[in-house]
Image: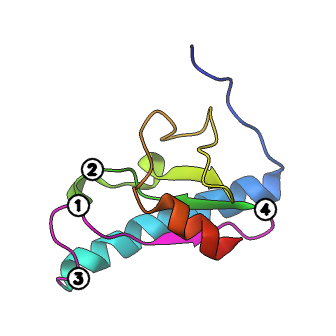
Amino acid sequence: MNAPPQEFGADVESAIARVRTEVAKLHAELTRYGLVVWTGGNVSGRVPGADLFVIKPSGVSYDDLAPENMILCDLDGTVIEGTPGAERSPSSDTAAHAYVYR
């Protein structure tokens, strides 16, 4: 069963969209500069004004990454159901990123 879409205030929704775009662009930089191999390695971004962050999905090619398939998580690393990308598994590094953000 699919969860209903998660809704946040307009400011947080705008911040989530900006961070999704930024994180997707940063992954392109990782490949551009040869900093990663295959799907290993990633960056994430904290959402200003909320206890949330965005991280790449697990096992997805960097060429296939886009803002809409980034994963939104809370600071415990739990995927926020009902948000774009939530049907995928987050990066295996999600717990480490969540720890840093907490």
- The numbered mark, 4 or 2, whose residue comes first in the sequence reads 4
2 and 1 marks in contact (CB < 8 Å): yes
Q: Which residues are magenta?
A: 34-49
The amino acid pointed to by label 4 is Ala
What is the CA distance from the residue labelled 2 to the residue labelled 1? 6 Å
Left or right: where 7 falls relative to 18: right
Q: Is residue 14 magenta?
A: no
- The numbered mark, 2 or 1, whose residue comes first in the sequence reads 1
2 and 3 marks in contact (CB < 8 Å): no
The amino acid pointed to by label 1 is Thr
Compared with residue 88, is residue 64 higher up or lower down, i.e. above or below?
below
The quadrant of the image that shows the N terminus is: top right
* Residue pointed to by mark 3: 35
- The numbered disc on residue 89 is none
- The numbered disc on residue 59 is 2
- The numbered mark, 2 or 3, whose residue comes first in the sequence reads 3
* Residue pointed to by mark 1: 39
Residue at 84 percent across and 49 percent down: it is 9
Helix, strand or loop at label 3? It is loop
- The numbered mark, 1 or 4, whose residue comes first in the sequence reads 1
Compared with residue 7, is residue 11 higher up or lower down, i.e. above or below?
below
- The location of residue 56, given as percent across then percent down, is 41, 57
- The location of residue 15, given as percent across then percent down, is 69, 63
Residue at 76 percent across and 39 percent down: it is 7
The amino acid pointed to by label 3 is Leu
- The numbered disc on residue 50 is 4
The amino acid pointed to by label 2 is Gly
**Which residue appears farthest toward the bottom when viewing the image?**
33
Helix, strand or loop at label 4? It is loop
Q: Is residue 43 magenta?
A: yes
Helix, strand or loop at label 2? It is loop
- The location of residue 33, given as percent across then percent down, is 20, 86
